[in-house]
Amino acid sequence: MIYHGNRFTLKPGVTAEQRETALESLRDQGRVIPAVRHFTVGPDHGGEYEWGAVFALDDLDGYWEYLVHPAHLNTDRIGLPLVDRFVSFDITDDPDPGLGARIAALHRRRYASMPEIEGLVADLGHYSGSAAPGEHAG
């Protein structure tokens, strides 16, 4: 099982309506992407970020399905322009030490095939973690 998560803080001036639209789009990902086994979207407590989302995926095939699904792309298009600070992470019970590199490769593949999404990510004020371009070149 792979738990893919995001923690983020929105830009100053984002309206409550914009915020709720983006959060609802994240929830929609959990409801409609077949590869998502369960999910949580809501306030991030105890850290430097305001919001977070975690999606449970069975394996790398499911991870790829999640990354390229239209519901995920919709969230990218409406949500990323609202985000100031963003971090992504992956937690897994798979003992394979190469899994992290393969996850990073999926993200690189997605960015290479979707320049619009790569551009939205590049415009973030701060982005680090497992899905950040250039973070894991291996």
Image (cartoon, rainbow, N blue to C red):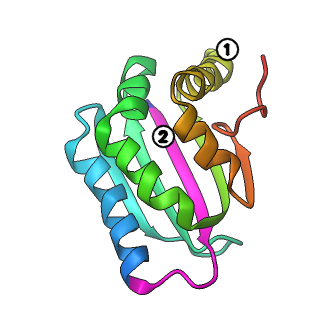
The residue identified by callout 2 is 3
- Locate residue 77 relative to residue 121 in the image: left or right: left
Name the one closer to the observer, 56 or 109: 109
The residue identified by callout 1 is 98
Residue at image position (54%, 57%) is 80
Please tell me whether residue 86 belongs to the stretch shown in magenta. no
In magenta, the rendered stretch is 2-16
**How packed is label 2: few (under 14 Cα within 10 Å), some, or many (20 or more)?**
many
Residue at image position (54%, 67%) is 82
Q: Secondary structure at mark 1?
A: loop
Q: Secondary structure at mark 2?
A: strand
Name the one closer to the observer, 119 or 21: 119
x%, y% of residue 49? 65, 70
x%, y% of residue 77? 44, 51
- Decide: is 122 above or below 134: below
- Locate residue 65 relative to residue 49 in the image: left or right: left
Residue at image position (58%, 29%) is 111
